Image (cartoon, rainbow, N blue to C red):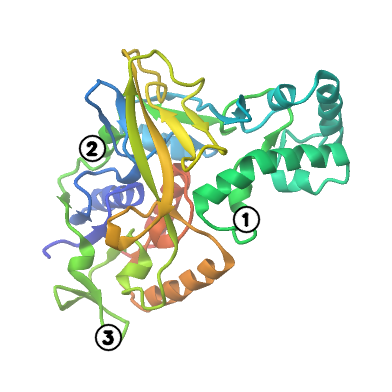
Amino acid sequence: MDKDVLIVGCGLCGSVIARELAEKGLQVQIWERRNHIGGNMYDYTDEHGILVQKYGPHAFHTKEKYLCEYICHYGEWHPYKLTCGAMFDNKYTPTPFNFTTIDTFYPKESATKLKEKLLNAFEGQSTATVLEVLQHPDPDIRGYAEFLFQKDYAPYTAKQWGISLSEIDPSVLKRVPLRFSYDEGYFDDPYQEMPVNSFDAFFKSLLDHPNISIKLEQDALEFLTVSSSGTELFLDGKSISFPVIYTGTLDELFGCCAGRLPYRSLRFDWKYEEKESLQEVPVVAYPQAPGYTRITEYKKLPYQDVRGTSYAVEYPLPYQLEQETEPYYPVLTEESKQQYMVYRGMAEKIPNLIPCGRLADFQYYDMDQALKRALEVLDSLQI
């Protein structure tokens, strides 16, 4: 390969690293297994004229100003506050759950009492995790958390991850807190943005550099192997010394020699209806529905003044390489984290291999976390 650096994967981490290295004068080659750039952020206009996201809903949010400034350097963005909800017991409520949730599911007198108790018990806090509220000594407060846990958190988590709640890493249950107010909006971050045009346009701008070349439908694992000593990378059977930024599944690079890491995949059932609106907000969870977890209505993500509505019904399923499903989410348990560290140790024995990204790091990253991780990797590179 007549390039200075090989990057495996054209998602956010790979693309950001590619751009920054190209700016330094390095010749960068990107190999992408899929037939498009942008990783899971890829979007396109469907046959009904609606911009949809192929791999599920994304909206950029961060607490860090410099991360927001970074993405805004590569295209026009505008403020967008994502709103989400949940449907159970045939009633709709905003998520994260808030005082509207209590008003919806409790009689008026009981709701007033519970809201007062929560404000007193969590004075000075705007939110708390469901795990914190479940441990509260007050039976009414604890009962509220138990109600939500049984109606939403437990059935949704069981479908999403395919394992028992006792196995799942607590960080998963902490992602959606309880609000002690009527505030709505899925995130509280001060910077919340969506591209004016599309995520695809953002990636095209990010990757528009003469030092970057991209090969689509190029599966790196057909060419890239690890030496029998475990200390070298081979490309087409020949040892290479140039840096390889690897954003794919780390276990598959090593031939799953320490067992397969568990990932969850998704199947999207795409639908279109000649109606103005399907649901109250763009993303709604359906914890009690058979099989599927949520529905995303894309004319609201962002809002598009178009006729009809396109939406995707999301079904979680196990990731299986043989069935050509996509690995979306690492299933974080104590066992899987230990198993991953075995692969990470193997990777560290290869000096020119740099794992980075949700799959390679075996971490659940939001977009801002993936961007931050890419910039941290860049700071650590001695090239």
Three-letter amino acid code at the position of disc 3: Ser
Examine the rendered structure and indicate whether residue 160 appears above or below residue 76.
Answer: below
Tag 2, which secondary structure? helix
Instruction: Give the CA distance from mark 3 to mark 2.
Output: 38 Å
- Residue with the mark numbered 2: 204
Residue 183, picture quadrant: top right
Q: Residue furthest front?
A: 290
- SS for callout 1: loop
- Residue type at the position of mark 2: Lys
Q: Residue furthest bottom?
A: 229
Relative to 336, is 270 above or below? Answer: above
Q: Which residue bears the numbered disc 1?
A: 165
Question: What amino acid type should be assigned to the residue bearing mark 1?
Answer: Leu
Going by the image, does 264 lie left or right of 325? right
In three-dimensional space, the C-alpha distance between marks 3 and 1, rounded to whole angstroms, equals 39 Å
Judge depth for marks 1 and 2 and give the one in front: 1
Residue where numbered disc 3 is placed: 228
Q: Is residue 344 left or right of residue 100?
A: left
The residue drawn where x is 20% and y is 40% is 208
User: Label 2: how many residues lie within 10 Å, few (<14), some (14-19) or many (20+)?
Assistant: some
Q: Which marked residue is nearer to the observer: mark 3 or mark 2?
A: 3
Query: Which image quarter holds the N terminus?
Result: bottom left
Q: Residues within 10 Å of mark 1 (few under 14, many from 20)?
A: some
